[in-house]
Image: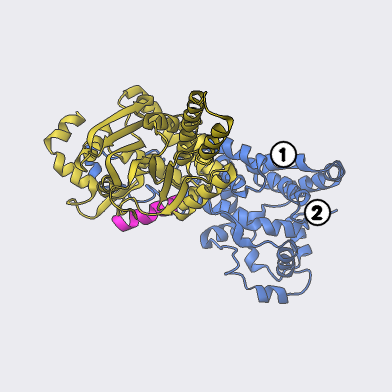
């Protein structure tokens, strides 16, 4: 049982996972590489997949990734005025959803406010409406941070194409060493990104550092399916179909082979929970989506 | 040799921290660029690449993948034809590659008009193509067969030269018909059958009445085109080579 193994020598295994005491050897999918090699290889993977990233996500998950991201946003339930940091946010999926969400919450707020202004003069209503209209996001802001230039490029193009401009900024940065001050953000998200970070422990520490007290950490990531039948079907699909899709749609077998292998190598739900707690977060919890194919981990900085 | 498919099981759960012996890059790679695949993956690749090649004709990589995943009967056949022919055997031993770096372009250009080398260079220039754009094989699970398909791809431009066909859609289809008869590669057969879909009716007429019958007759009559050591015949006039092979003069 994995739990027993976890309890018997947690420090050793976790340290090995973090690539500390076990030496400089890390995993890149099922290969063994050094830390620096791993960072470089992963950079190249995303450089190569950036343009077809969204198409591939839709093909591989049959569009279900959109639902997962929507669920993440509902769980976050941001109110206007929230400052969000979306790490490894590359092509902007989370950022755009955030903007849509606070925008609609803000609209509802304004509607309610207008309803209460029944006894104001037309002039006063007009003025208050004008003031609020220029603040359609209610001062909410999202910073998209990604280590990969190509992914950011695609994200910016998408934003322009879809008409997102307000409350959005793009920063090139490394999750292991964020270019932000302490205690800055209300929420930190990392969706399908933490799997690609070489030193997960550092990324978690950085997340803790840049969050304000009371801030929330949210991680959406592929996780482990415990149901044996489902697990076999999932493996079959992952290993047989996904690299083929990568070759046919993006002309890139190897990047998608890496993808499915990296999912298998990533720590399961409980282990990730322990790592998040190690970084100092409280009330750490996780929610499985689709029987554990994906999990949302959440924690708070107090 | 056989290769292990790329759905290899992950190392034991407890050993995930990098403590155990990992599989090396490429599992059981038989040649650089080789990606071992399971039969299911090959089937999916064949279907997917066929659809994608039709949907987006500029995806030459998909045509290449289709050829590799469906060539399991035709390629050994071709290889055996080569083995049983003195010149073909020679080629299999020496494994020559047709690349810009290995071709002496200046020398070929200096050859007399009508010679294979001169006409080949003229063909490359006229159609603005280069022999270096051929995809290396990935999904062939035998390194000798991988060379055979590589040789077939690199010789394709010489086919154009010998048949006198340009690289437009019409010319390509004609060459595909010839190659289909010569090699039996399913990819050539599919390309020959579906290629004409995008042609105008006038061209289709010319194709059906003159070009295809000629291509088929030549293909059937000619000895195996892969059994010719082209690199040693640059000086030979194209016409003489055609006669030697059994390719009828183009209409």
Colour displayed for chain A in the image of the structure? yellow
Q: Which of the two marks, 2 or 1, is nearer to us in this view?
A: 1
Task: Please state the extent of the stretch shown in magenta in the rendering.
Answer: A35-46
Q: Nearer the viewer, residue B234 or B25?
A: B25
The colouring scheme, among rainbow, by chain, secondary structure or one colour, is: by chain
Asked whether B34 falls inside the magenta stretch, the response is: no
Q: Is residue A40 on the magenta stretch?
A: yes
Total numbered labels: 2
A56 or B1: which is nearer to us? A56
Left or right, residue A187 beside residue B131: left
**Residue A237 spot, x, y in % from top left:** 44, 31
Residue A246 at x, y percent in the picture: 50, 42
Colour of chain B as rendered? blue
Residue B116 horizontal side relative to residue B132, left or right = right
Q: Quadrant of residue A173?
A: bottom left
Mark 1 highlights which residue?
B194
Residue designated by label 2: B248
Counting other residues with Cα less than 10 Å from the Cα at mark 1, is it few (<14), some (14-19), or many (20 or more)? few
In primary-sequence order, the first of circles 2 and 1 is: 1
Q: The residue tagged with tag 2: helix, strand or loop?
A: loop
Q: Is residue A248 above or below residue B148?
A: above
Residue at horizontal 36 percent and vertical 51 percent from the top: B25
């Amino acid at each position: 049982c994995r739990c027993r193994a976890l309890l018997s020598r947690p420090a050793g295994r976790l340290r090995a996972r973090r690539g500390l005491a076990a030496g400089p050897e890390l995993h890149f999918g099922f290969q063994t590489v050094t830390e620096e090699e791993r960072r470089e290889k992963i950079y190249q993977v995303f450089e190569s997949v950036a343009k077809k990233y969204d198409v591939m996500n839709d093909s591989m998950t049959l569009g279900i990734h959109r639902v997962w991201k929507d669920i993440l946003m509902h769980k976050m339930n941001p109110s206007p005025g929230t400052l969000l940091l979306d790490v490894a946010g590359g092509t902007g999926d989370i950022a755009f959803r955030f903007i849509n969400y606070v925008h609609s919450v803000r609209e509802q707020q304004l509607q309610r406010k207008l309803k209460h202004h029944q006894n104001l003069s037309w002039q006063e209503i007009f003025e208050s409406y004008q003031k609020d209209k220029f603040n359609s996001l209610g001062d909410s802001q999202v910073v998209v941070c990604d280590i990969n230039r190509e992914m950011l490029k695609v994200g910016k193009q998408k934003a322009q194409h879809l008409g997102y401009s307000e409350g959005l900024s793009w920063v090139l940065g490394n999750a292991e060493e964020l270019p932000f001050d302490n205690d800055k953000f209300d929420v930190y998200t990392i969706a399908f990104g933490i799997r690609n970070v070489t030193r997960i422990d550092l990324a978690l520490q950085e997340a803790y550092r840049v969050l304000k007290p009371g801030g929330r950490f949210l991680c959406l990531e592929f996780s482990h399916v415990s149901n044996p039948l489902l697990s076999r079907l999932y493996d079959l699909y992952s290993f047989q179909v996904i690299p083929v899709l990568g070759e046919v749609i993006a002309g890139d077998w190897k990047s998608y082979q890496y993808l499915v292998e990296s999912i298998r190598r990533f720590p399961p739900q409980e282990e990730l929970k322990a790592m998040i707690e190690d970084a100092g977060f409280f009330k750490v919890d996780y929610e499985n989506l689709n029987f554990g194919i994906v999990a949302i981990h959440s924690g708070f900085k107090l | 040799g056989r290769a292990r498919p790329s759905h290899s099981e992950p190392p034991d759960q407890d050993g995930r921290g990098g403590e155990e012996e990992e599989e090396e890059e490429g599992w059981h790679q038989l040649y650089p660029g080789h990606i071992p695949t399971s039969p299911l993956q090959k089937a999916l690749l064949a279907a997917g690449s066929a659809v994608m090649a039709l949907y987006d004709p500029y995806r030459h990589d998909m045509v290449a993948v289709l050829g590799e995943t469906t060539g399991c009967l035709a390629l050994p056949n071709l290889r055996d034809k080569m083995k049983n022919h003195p010149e073909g055997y020679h080629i299999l031993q020496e494994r020559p590659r047709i690349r810009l770096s290995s071709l002496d372009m200046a020398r070929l250009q200096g050859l007399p008009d009508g010679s294979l080398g001169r006409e080949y260079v003229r063909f490359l220039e006229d159609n603005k193509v280069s022999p270096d754009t051929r995809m290396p094989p990935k999904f062939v699970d035998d390194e000798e067969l991988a060379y055979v398909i590589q040789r077939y791809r690199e010789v394709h431009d010489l086919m154009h030269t010998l048949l006198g066909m340009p690289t437009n859609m019409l010319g390509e289809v004609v060459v595909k018909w010839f190659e289909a008869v010569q090699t039996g590669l399913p990819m050539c057969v599919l390309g020959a059958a579906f290629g004409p879909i995008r042609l105008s009716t006038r061209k289709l007429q010319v194709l059906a009445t003159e070009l295809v019958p000629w291509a088929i007759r030549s293909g059937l009559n000619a000895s195996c085109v892969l059994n010719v050591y082209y690199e040693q015949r640059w000086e030979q006039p194209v016409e003489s080579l055609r006669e030697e092979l059994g390719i009828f003069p183009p209409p």
